[in-house]
Image (cartoon, rainbow, N blue to C red):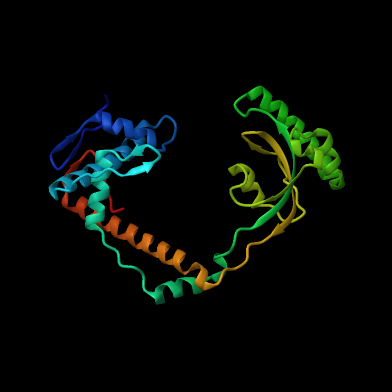
Amino acid sequence: MNSALFPDLVVNGELVPHTLVAAETQNQQAPKGKPGIAWRKAANAVAIRTLLLQEARTRAVTPEPQEVGPGRFETEEEALIRGLLEEAVEVAAPQAEAIQDEWQKDPTRFRTHPLWEVSHILCICDPRDAEASAKARVRADTILAMVLENPKSFQTLAARESDCGSKSSGGALGQLGPGDTVPEFEAALRTLAEGATTREPVLTRHGYHIIRMDAVAEGQVLPFDAVQEKISDALEKAAWATQARQFVNQLVEAAEIKGADLSPV
């Protein structure tokens, strides 16, 4: 193994196994063919985790794994780190004035969910099948060209060409809100003005969609009383994250670390 690209990681005299850093590289993004970059990012992440575990054991934190999903529990190390941060990071609830100030910065940020009335034409395919996807894309491009040339033909083309059951209603899907569709479809909806049609077919797990926004009901601005608790929670989480970073930076500054290059986070 190239020791320049993959140096040993030593944190306060503790030699971290190469296998731990290697496993962490899977969670790090790096340019193709640049394994050294992925390794350095992974080494930094593992160094911070090691520092937190060392501090948790120094403070004699007792790991109490919590359920994080149906039948899934934290590992002992995850519980140790959570317990350490709960002990080391204390955040006071935000003051009423701070909550009010945050809301007044832009009250229009706080709205009810929008509603979209949508129609589509689906050219079904499995995106994992390159040949089928290519054929579906050609078909979708052809139909879209006809729609753009004559927008009034959308319902007729949907009834004739769509692979979705909505073809019986001219492609109409009715009213949709956030979370009602797959992410790629919803992302396209958020870019469409009322009456507009996607300029390119949209690929989802179901195939290629030609989407038309028939009507939009924008979410209504909520009064302060309705969002006060939400703003308070957001401010508290932001303050907690800031203090947690400061705590980690203090551990880094006091540590002796080889094989990682940690700057304040």
Give percent across and percent down for residue 102: 46, 71
Count every numbered label the image shows and give the total.
0
User: What residue is drawn where x is 36% and y is 35%?
Assistant: 38
Residue 221 quadrant: bottom right
Residue 99 quadrant: bottom left
Q: Say left or right for 24 vs 53.
A: right
Depth check, front residue: 237 or 167: 167
User: What residue is drawn where x is 25% and y is 40%?
Assistant: 77
Give percent across and percent down for residue 174: 73, 49
Q: Say left or right for 68 vs 49.
A: right
Depth check, front residue: 251 or 229: 229
Residue 48 in sight in this render: no
> In the displayed structure, would residue 216 be above or below residue 182?
below
User: What residue is drawn where x is 20% and y is 52%?
Assistant: 251
Give percent across and percent down for residue 190: 64, 52
> In the displayed structure, would residue 109 be above or below residue 115?
below
Residue 186 in sight in this render: yes
Residue at far front of view: 71
Q: Say left or right for 187 vs 73.
A: right
Depth check, front residue: 242 or 73: 73
Residue at far bottom of view: 97
User: What residue is drawn where x is 66% and y is 61%?
Assistant: 218
Residue 22 quadrant: top left
> In the displayed structure, would residue 219 be above or below residue 140?
below
The N terminus lies in quadrant: top left
